[in-house]
Amino acid sequence: MSEAPQGAPIKTPGQLIAAVVAAFAIPIVVIWLLAYHVNETVRTGAGTDLLADAAVAKRIAPVAQVTVNDANAPRAFKTGEEVFKAVCATCHAAGLAGSPKFGDNAAWAPRIAQGYDALLHSALQGKNAMPPRGGATPDAYSDYEIARAVVYMANAGGAKFAEPSAPPAQGPGATATAQAASGAPAQSADAAAQAAAQQAATAMASLNAPSAPAAASPPATATASADAAQAGKALYQQVCQACHAAGVLNAPKFGNKADWAPRLKEPMDKIYDYALHGKGAMPPKGGSTASDADVKAAVDYMVNAAK
């Protein structure tokens, strides 16, 4: 049985033209469909703001930002709650690492019993797993702001500590700020110039006038001694009191002559050396960064109280 002869699929000129057109049109349609599908993933619908100037600027903004603060501007201190949320809440909000949980009166009771000064000392110098200042730097949060956070947490745990006193304003803008706070009018530039001219004229007149016997002034030594005593008392209250007020870790108790008697048998230079370089459980300078002069003044303050 013989097979039937097979004819060519394209038999007419019209079929040839159709085949040629299809050979070009079909690949073009397929490519267009693929391109449309890929582009569909980044297309935006009507009313979108993804391509708005603000949205684009936010997406291409650098990660790091530089903030320049005016060193002469008065510092705006953070509240105790703000410092707590920024620094202390990491541990104290949940009571991590043995820290007293915020608002837990039972956990805070033994800490509050130690007194405000002891709590502030622990916050500034660190205690157990808590780093000094909760890991913050003095540039980020001042001692005053840390103190406000201590009062905020302690009062939430049942204490009734008073708000710490704000430090005196510093810097060129401090005077204007103080005047604005007190309601006093600021001195104008013309008034300041007139006052300066008047002072200069007074000074010239005093130079031309016959000299008069100078009034007796207090000795400089007495003034310096008073300043050192104040610095020693302040450092004791801020640092030394944490141990010496109650005789913690065998520290000689403040004002206890029996505790201090064997220490006072040694030369004062030796006692100064113990305070500056540490002895027993006491770290150098009590763990503070005070100057040598202030540490010696604090030693003198404690020694004088024990005599």
Image: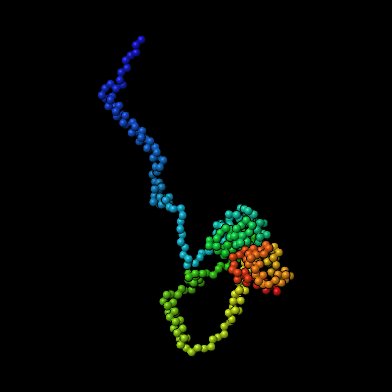
Position of 24 compared to 231: left or right? left
Closest to the observer: 67 or 163?
A: 67
Query: In the figure, residue 125 lies in which quadrant?
Result: bottom right
Residue at the top extreme, as displayed: 1
Where is residue 9 shown, x and y percent of the image? 31, 21
Q: Residue at x 49, y 69 (%)?
A: 171
Closest to the observer: 48 or 89?
A: 89
Where is residue 170 shown, x and y percent of the image? 51, 69
Position of the C terminus, as image quadrant, is: bottom right
Q: Residue at x 57, y 65 (%)?
A: 144
Where is residue 60 shown, x and y percent of the image? 42, 51
For the question of whether residue 77 can be seen, the reply is: yes
For the question of whether residue 246 can be seen, the reply is: no
Residue at the left extreme, as displayed: 13
Where is residue 118 shown, x and y percent of the image? 64, 63
Q: Residue at x 63, y 67 (%)?
A: 276
Position of the N terminus, as image quadrant, is: top left
Position of 71 compared to 288: left or right? left
Q: Residue at x 38, y 44 (%)?
A: 46
Position of 258 compared to 101: left or right? right
Residue at the right extreme, as displayed: 258
Position of 112 compared to 75: left or right? right
The correct choice, above or below, for 81 with respect to 56 in the image is below
